[in-house]
Amino acid sequence: MTTLAFLSANLDLGYLLPAFREEFPDADLRTMAELGPLDAIDAAVCWCPPAGLMARMPNLALIQSVGAGIDHLTADAELPPVPVCRIVDTDMASGMAAYVTWAVIHGQRHMGRYLASAAAGRWEEAPIQPPRAHRVGIAGLGTLGLVCARALMALGYSVRGWSRSPREVPQGLDCFHGQTQQAEFLAGCDTLVCLLPLTDETTGILNRDLFAQLPRGAHLINVGRGAHLVEADLIPALDAGHLGAATLDAFVQEPLPPEHPFWRDPRILVTPHIATRTQPAVIARQTRMNLERIRAGRAAEVAVDLQRGY
């Protein structure tokens, strides 16, 4: 019998169980409340699992993230040497493109100002700028970044991208890479979208030095990871005019505490990590496929390079 454990220190993964029962009808599915003997567990389905727990599972064959990122797993210094897989979901990409497109338009078309005017019963116009005159930079040109770039380009926005190394990109997308081209990339971003993987190199990349390289009044959209942003640098950058607004969907501490100053700053729009979500059936199906490949002696299709962090 296959035994799967659903592991998280801060999220109830019970919502996945019906879908996993469909994909693994004969499996033993265990939650954090009833893990039982750890040597019986074959695969761990995870989001921020307790540190060191999987190292105590001697027969573990697969560590499956329930999202596209795996930084919540690599933070565990005792991560056992078994395949680590992430989720690849085309619906997740379209969901992210919808969120990012909304966030760009919301800022570029002054929708926050219109909402405030509507609430006060005021008919007030803001300057209208065509999309082609607004430059959107996407930091991170993986699957999600490229889908967002195509969506924004289709609406007429001037889009540029930045990645750690050269990438093949759609025609019309200005592409920059590496540290030597980062400043040039940033200088042309009226809106900056962060979709980078979280690695040692990108932790804290959204900081005061980076903000100072953007055009004054730029809009920051962080849909990557909370740890990309140095939170203490954001409000000072807004006060100094280096940034004009920020839309944030990921945070170091989630849920964001009620007393956090981001909630009360009208220049900052907070959403509760909902930019996009993967359906449980997709997670269950990819977990089964990965486990079957591993048991057949083949590499899992979406196994992660732990040295690179993605």
Image (spheres, helix red, strand yellow):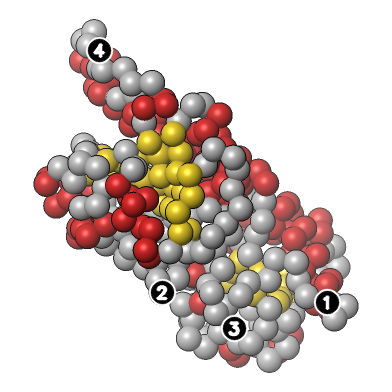
Q: Amino acid at mark 2?
A: Asp
Name the residue at the top extreme.
Answer: 123
What's the CA distance linking mark 4 and mark 1? 60 Å
Residue under numbered circle 3: 54
- Amino acid type of disc 3? Met
Above or below, 68 against 99 in this view is below
Q: Give the mark nearest the N terminus, 1 or 2.
A: 2
* C-beta proximity under 8 Å, tags 1 and 2: no
Q: What number is the disc on residue 200?
A: 2
| Image marks 4 and 2: residues in contact by CB distance under 8 Å | no
For the point 60% across and 43% down, the residue is: 170
Q: Which residue is mark 4?
A: 125
Inspect the image, locate mark 1, and give the three-letter code of the amino acid beneath it. Answer: Arg
Name which of mark 4 and mark 1 comes first in the sequence: 4
Work out whether mark 2 precedes mark 3 in sequence or the reverse, and give the earlier one. 3
Residue that carries the numbered disc 1 in the rendered image:
298
Q: Which residue is painted at 32% across and 38% down in the image?
A: 190
> How far from the left and from the top, in percent, is residue 179?
38, 65
In the image, which is nearer the foreground, mark 2 or mark 3?
Answer: 2
Q: CA distance from mark 2 to mark 3?
A: 22 Å
Q: Secondary structure at mark 2?
A: loop
Real-space Cα separation, disc 4 to disc 2, in angstroms: 44 Å
Is 154 situated left or right of 82 in this image? Answer: left
**Is 165 left or right of 43, judged from the image as shown?**
left
**Separation of marks 3 and 4 at Cα, in angstroms:** 57 Å
Please identify the quarter of the rendering in which residue 270 is found: top left
Which residue is more in the foreground, 235 or 122? 235
Residue drawn where x is 54% and y is 38% of the image: 172
Task: State whether residue 19 is above or below residue 27.
Answer: above
| Residue 223 shows in the view | no
